[in-house]
Amino acid sequence: MEETEKTEEGWFDFYESFTELFEFFCDNTTIHGTIRLNCSRRNKMKTGFWVLLYISAFATMYFQFGDTFTQYWSYPTKLAINLQTKKSNFPAVTICNLNPYRFDQVNEYLNQLDQLAQETLLTLYGYNDSLSVNQNEDVVHLEDITNNVTSQVNESFQLDRSIKLVKLEADQNQMADGKRNKLGFKLCNSSGGDCYYRYFWSGVDALREWYKFHFINIMSKIPSVLPISDQEYLDRFILTCEFNGHICDRNYTQFHHPTYGTCYTINANENSDTPGATIIPEKKYGISLIVKVDQHDNMPLLSTSAGTTLMIHNPTQSPLVEHQGFDIWPGTETSISVRQDQVNRLGKPYGDCTFNGSELEFSLLYNSSYTLQACLQSCFQYRMIEQCGCSYYLYPLAPGSEYCNYNKYPGWGHCFFRLHEQLIAHQHTCFQKCPKQCTETMYDLSAGFARWPSPVSKGWILQELFSEYGYNRTSNRSEISKINVYFQELNLRSFDETPALNSHDLLSTMGNQWSFYFGSSVLSVAEIAELVFDVVAMVIIMKYAKYKKNQVSNNNESPYVIRMDGLTDFNERTLPNSPQEKQELPSYLVIGDSGTKPEEL
């Protein structure tokens, strides 16, 4: 009876040789071209050609893989512009009268400065006219406009007359270009060994900057930004205010800026019964202001413009009118249409940005949300304290420091302008310490102007202002301005930064390259992984089998071996070497293989 062999399949099936393994892989894989390595093995030329082609394809593909990964790890970004139709909160409006007060506490020193400026104008241009303000109504006592704020003027101030405005000779190349002599003033460090020349081609700019430098030294004992609490000063400036067709509640944020004068921030969302988010894109549904323009400057050399300065900004941000404000003409109606944009930036690793500035090495000096400009000015102020020993007057005062003045800090002006040059040239370290905002609200403005009031309507408009607000009916139109701020449209335009190559794009690109060169899919990659696993398993098994074989061979060897070549017994007979002869050896000898090293018992 014939027995039938039954073969059972096991969990693992290993090949007898690597040749068998590679032949099976080439015949059964789904990778295109691999089968040609096996079917053309009888033709060495074809086999060599396909091997070279296969290796070249693999090398090219993996080179492109490396280039793709390099691009992915550089974290590139792209900008997507989205347009949404939605209601937006109305921005805040800050307006200043461009006429800073002369405070009684420092008026004596300001008069000395005006006298020095008058002498300078006479020397340089032959201009002889009084610049001093002696009228009592133009001088304000600090305690009259603020609450709980007092000056620190407890010692006399000495005006430094050695810092003079002089003409600086231009070199021959500049004279050949038709440029005139420069005007400027010299500032030296505390030892006098290094001097800095602050010069201008415009005499007007030179005089204003020179006057401003002396001015901030005089004002160093008075806070730079003063909260105004007296309603009377508000009523003198803003005559009417309407928002969304309703009268404003006049719940304004009021402060005094040392160079821009009295300023008011109008937050439309807090000054009307109608929420700011229900704004209609039309002129009459925005903010409408009628303001009184002060044509009589308290300090004509510090503020040479007549009109107002306006800034439109995010309600959560501090109004930095010196950087983002623009001037409004007197005697005009100015209509400003606003379009809101939002910029959304990606954080690390795609870029360096911050949401609230919590990652900064220092704290912001502004009591508001984070902005790049607020960060730069705060950082600059800390650098001023570190290198110059005091704080710059036009920036917020840092805790534990005091404002600079050349009576106490003789070389601070030289130190400041050296640092400021680096800041202007974007070479200051603060640009590395202050990242951009991850989410930033911006306003695109378009302005139009018209004469207001017109000659025909001037009479009744001034009469109405006189009847309702006590405005002087004999004044001319150059002393009032009308300002309209409204949304141009309710479309919110957002600029969103997105990854140019994310993980999904990375896998897609690699899959396209793999399919292009080998016409296969991700399952083919699994086949290669299986091949690698089989090769590694076979190597391990072969190494293990060899190790066990050597171990068994070593266990079967006799520990004591006597080499028989050339030895004789007690009868002086030569000992046998053949296997048959070795069986006749005496029992006291242990015979080992020939060629081993003999050892004594």
Image (spheres, helix red, strand yellow):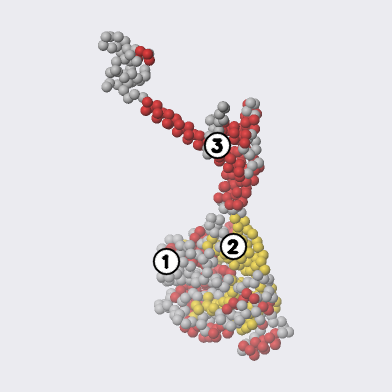
Compared with residue 405, is residue 107 higher up or lower down, i.e. above or below?
below
Alpha carbons under labels 3 and 1: distance apart? 87 Å
Residue 339 picture location, percent across and down? 65, 69
Q: Earlier in the sequence, mark 2 or mark 1?
A: 2
- Mark number displayed over residue 344: 2
**How would you rate the neighbour count of disc 3 (Cα within 10 Å): few for under 14, some for 14-19, many for 20 or more?**
few
Q: Amino acid at mark 2?
A: Asn
Q: Residue at x 55, y 57 (%)?
A: 351
Residue 152 picture location, percent across and down? 42, 77
Outermost residue on the right side: it is 456
Query: CB of mark 3 within 8 Å of CB of mark 1?
Result: no
**How would you rate the neighbour count of disc 2 (Cα within 10 Å): few for under 14, some for 14-19, many for 20 or more?**
some
- Mark number displayed over residue 521: none
Q: Earlier in the sequence, mark 3 or mark 1?
A: 3
Name the residue tied to disc 1: 389
Compared with residue 342, is residue 26 higher up or lower down, i.e. above or below?
above
Q: Residue at x 62, y 74 (%)?
A: 277
Alpha carbons under labels 2 and 1: distance apart? 38 Å
Q: Amino acid at mark 3?
A: Glu
**Which mark is nearer the camera, 3 or 2?**
3
Label 3, secondary structure: give it. loop
**Which mark is nearer the camera, 3 or 1?**
3
- Mark number displayed over residue 9: 3
Residue 242 picture location, percent across and down? 63, 81
Query: 565 or 478, which is in the foreground?
Result: 565
Q: Earlier in the sequence, mark 3 or mark 2?
A: 3
Query: CB of mark 2 within 8 Å of CB of mark 1?
Result: no
- The quarter holding residue 444 reads bottom right
Whether residue 69 sits left or right of residue 216 in the image: it is right
**Which mark is nearer the camera, 2 or 1?**
2
